Image: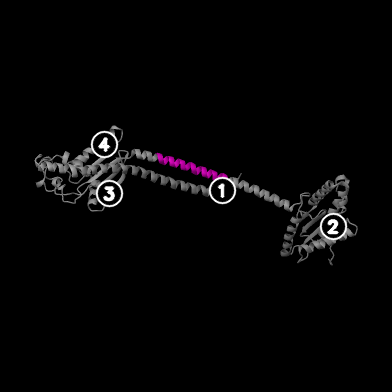
Amino acid sequence: MRLNSRKVRGLGIFFVVSSLCYCTLLYYFFVQTRAFAFSEGEKQIESVLLTHKAIHSFEEKVQKPEIYRLKQEGHLYSDYFSPKLLSCTYMARNIEEYFSQEREKIGLPPLYFKLATENPRIEVNAADPLERDLLQRMRSGALTKYSEMVQVDGHYSLYYAIPIEKTTSSCLKCHGDPKTAPRELLAQYGDTKAFHETEGDIRALISIRVPLDDQIKAARLIFVRLSVGTGILLSLLFTVVSLSVVQLKRHQRIIMCQNEELNRLATVDVLTGISNRQGFVAIMEQMLACGKRHDMSLSLIMMDLDFFKKINDTYGHGVGDAVLAAIGKLLNEERRSSDIVARWGGEEFMIICPHTELDGAVKLAEKIQSCLAEQEFPQGIQMTASFGVAQYRPQDTLDQLVDRVDVALYRSKDNGRNQIHQESQDD
């Protein structure tokens, strides 16, 4: 079934809107799945930071106080220093290295962990240009943390940087004045690096990079599934809407055909196939309105079959109906193209003759009278008819015009039937 341009345009608009919605959803899915991968990376980083914080807390609250107690009680000499026990940086870095090794044993990629500073005791902790810039911004208070998704050697990672806790008085024993530092520390690292700090300083930042390949892969899989699922749903929706529009159009056409048929049945005489009285009246009213506006001549012919009741009584109503149908066909064939014929009553017929003076209508009536005389009807029946003819006058109503043509018809019947009479000036 073909759709009209309005329906096609409506479906086109719906398709465009659906496509825009789909693209918007794709972008939303992409952002959300990337956010998912980012969030999973942050969870790993949070775990690492908690581990580091726990190590730092253990060192500050348990390990260092215990070492200092042993020194005070003489169990350790006063210049004792070992980074394995007294350096939080050393312990955190080595613990993270062991942690990465354990990850690799079960097939997981290692983590990147670094306590970066501008003045490190060992070069492995030296800050790179990005870390130096971040450290300066953190010291100025312009930045509290930093994160971004990066690609290293073709692999996605989440990079995260956060300042370590500010320097405390306990930290100054190893990072303050080198003159008061343990001799073994000076012997190992010298007296120039990582000294002269003050309480409250931010001497380093924690630089972490966790791999996101698995999370990105999972996010892409979720994105593909959501995209395909949404695409299928939108396609199904578009199909359903399209089919509904087609079905609606089909129902509309059925209803239109039914309405047309009802309208035809309401205005057409079923037996003869010409207009019935109701349809004829509607057409006449339009004709009269047009005649008034445009000063158009218009005539009306009324025809009554002579002694039609005898046919029904003699031959039955079936034959009578066949005669009426034949009369309707004859009138429809003999009328002019602009004329309109109708069944007015049982055996009465009307003919509207637009653009026709009274004389022209009389000639048409004569032609029909002649054709009736020559027509062969069922059972060899011969038919005649009486005619009345009237012309529309300015300011006529439909009833007035019908009354005049009816009077002319009865003159024909009163004078012996099978005659044509036209209205008189006195009518």
Q: Amino acid at mark 3?
A: Lys
Colour scheme employed for the rendering of this structure: one colour
Please give the residue where the numbered disc 3 appears in the rendered image. 145
Q: Which mark is residue 387?
A: 2
Residue at 46 percent of width and 48 percent of height: 21
Magenta extent? 221-244
Classify mark 4: helix, strand or loop.
helix
Nearer mark to the viewer, of 2 and 4: 4
**Nearer to us in this view, 170 or 40:** 170
Mark 1 crowdedness (10 Å alpha carbons): few <14, some 14-19, many ≥20: some
Which numbered disc, 3 or 2, marks the residue that appears first in the sequence? Answer: 3
Label 3, label 2: how far apart the Cα atoms are: 108 Å
Q: Separation of disc 2 and disc 4 at Cα?
A: 116 Å
Give the label, 1 or 3, closer to the camera.
3
Residue 227 position, x and y percent, is 44, 42
Main secondary structure along the magenta-highlighted residues: helix
Give the Cα distance between marks 4 and 1. 62 Å
Q: Residue furthest right?
A: 416
Contact? badges 4 and 3 (CB < 8 Å): no
Q: Which residue is mark 4?
A: 100
What secondary structure is found at the residue carrying circle 2? strand
Question: Would residue 57 appear left or right of 8 to someone viewing this image?
Answer: left
Q: Is residue 70 magenta?
A: no
Q: Are marks 1 and 3 in contact (CB under 8 Å)?
A: no
> Which residue is tagged 1?
8
Which sits earlier in the primary sequence, circle 2 or circle 4?
4
Residue 10 at x, y = what percent? Answer: 55, 50
What SS does tag 3 mark?
Answer: loop
- Please state which amino acid type lies under the numbered disc 2: Phe
Give the vertical position of 117 relative to 280 (above or below). Answer: above
Amino acid on which disc 1 is placed: Val
**Residue 180 pos. (x, y %):** 10, 47
